[in-house]
Image (cartoon, helix red, strand yellow):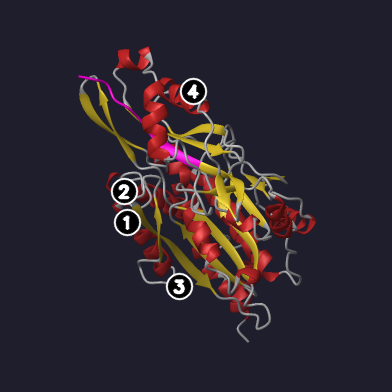
Amino acid sequence: MNFRFLISASLVLLSPLSLLSQNETAERLKKHVQILTSDSLMGRMAGTPGEKKASLYIHDEFTKADIETLFDRNGQQFSFLSTFGDTISSQNIIGIIEGCDPKLRDELIIVGAHYDHLGFNKLSVNGKMVTQIFRGANDNASGTAVLIEVARELKRVSFDLKRSVMVVAFGASEASLTGSWFFIDNAAKYRDKIKLMINIDQVGVSPGEYNPQIFTILPSPELTALINSVSEKPAMITPVIKTSDIFTSDHTNFVTHGIPVAMFTTAQKKQLPTEKDVSETLDYEGMTDLTMYIATLVRDAANTEVSLPATSLKETKEEDVEKGDNQIYTVYDVDKKPSFLNGGEKQFLDRWVYDYVKYPRSAIESGVQGRVVVEFIIEKNGEVSSVKVVKSVSDALDAEAVKVVSASPKWKPGMKSGAPVRVKMAIPIEFKLRK
């Protein structure tokens, strides 16, 4: 009997990263982020060549780690309409690490992160054209890098996994979570086999010491106990567990199907896009510790004798939809989109926004112009609510954009199954100075 092999295997089971150099992991994480935030990817906006390049890089990293992918280098492709009616194409990159237990290998643990961001702006500052790239190092090159390294580690210990693990890099998340919606909507054959979804979003920076949080959305004693058991292992970080949500991300599309979720983030709130979100600002040592933690959590979830129970949210949602609940839909989910004066977003821009928006004096004096993207909800009674900036230019322009949208007259609400529903929308508001 080869006792040396048995001893080595035991060490691997005890600590996923104990036989690897954490410095090497940190360096790989840094390399992933630097590539994903490079000039050539131009902010990785959904449907752009930059987002496509990012997807190819992720696919190739999975392949290097000997992880089987479910599609070729083009990934799981999908298309959707933008708010202006343009067809946008994107893709999810999906890897599978098969479990070894004959009875449990058909059950799945999903680990996901979105890799797209918000692209770039062309600005004119004092008469000079400037390209403003939103590199998205923290949002969400950080989560994508951790996903790649978690996948690498899980493949290394795959002989110890009873259940199978699917690693998914979601495209077009910044476009109403379209990638994760498409993934779960096309997973009907195995959706009920998904026992846990782990989402990794904005995990590179935290105020003060590196301090990740885990949001389970709903109370789950079984999931909390599983997480606590990982935190109690030697050399592990101890994330704070919260039975609530922090911001909408790709886990949302799994929650609605009753799938338990664990959302990892170091953010205090959804980060607004900024030029300052660059690779040099991230905590790669903290991200390395998080990689070890998530890999261990996935392994333990894959090996529990009893699966985590489904939540009650799926059934609640289905009942509530019949009664007219407060669920928020995207424009792609409804039978009839909200309308403004018998038109859509363009009508709203032309007949309201550009008629009433005022260029802030401070922005005129500083020569700032550009495109502010504003997100809002059309309520069931047609009122506009929850107005916020999702792509910023400056404080002054952002505030004016929010002000004019918030003052909107009522819309005709979106309709689904013959009833009005709440619909989330987004519009770009252009601020241009006259020469």
> Disc 4 on helix, strand or loop?
helix
Which sits in the foreground, 100 or 93?
A: 93
Q: Split into 4 quadrants, where in the image is the N terminus?
A: bottom right
- Decide which of tag 2 and tag 1 comes sooner along the chain: 2
Residue, disc 4: 403
* Residue labelled with disc 2: 41
- Mark 2 or mark 4, which is nearer to you? 4
Magenta span of residues: 425-435
In the picture, measured across the screen, residue 247 lies left or right of residue 82, that is right
The quarter of the rendered structure image containing the C terminus is top left
Asked whether, in this view, residue 214 is left or right of residue 171, the answer is: right
Callout in the foreground (1, 4): 4
- 1 w.r.t. 142: above or below: below
C-alpha distance separating marks 3 and 2? 24 Å
Residue furthest front in the image: 342
Q: Dot 3: few (<14), some (14–19), or many (≥20) neighbours within 10 Å?
A: few
Q: Is residue 178 above or below residue 386?
A: below
Mark 2 crowd level (few <14, some 14–19, many ≥20, 10 Å Cα): many
- Is residue 176 at all visible to an observer of this figure? yes
Above or below for 133 versus 61: above
Q: Tell me residue 196's x, y (percent).
A: 65, 62
Image-based side of 327 in relation to 185, left or right: right
Secondary structure under tag 1 reads helix
Q: Earlier in the sequence, mark 3 or mark 1?
A: 1
Which amino acid type corresponds to the residue marked 3 in the rendered image? Leu
Look at label 2 and name its amino acid.
Answer: Leu
**Which residue in the protein does label 3 denote?**
70
Establish if 351 lies above or below 289.
above
Residue 211 locus on image (x, y percent): 61, 40
Q: Which amino acid does label 1 sit on?
A: Lys
Q: Name the residue under label 1.
A: 53
Mark 3 vs 2, N-terminal side: 2
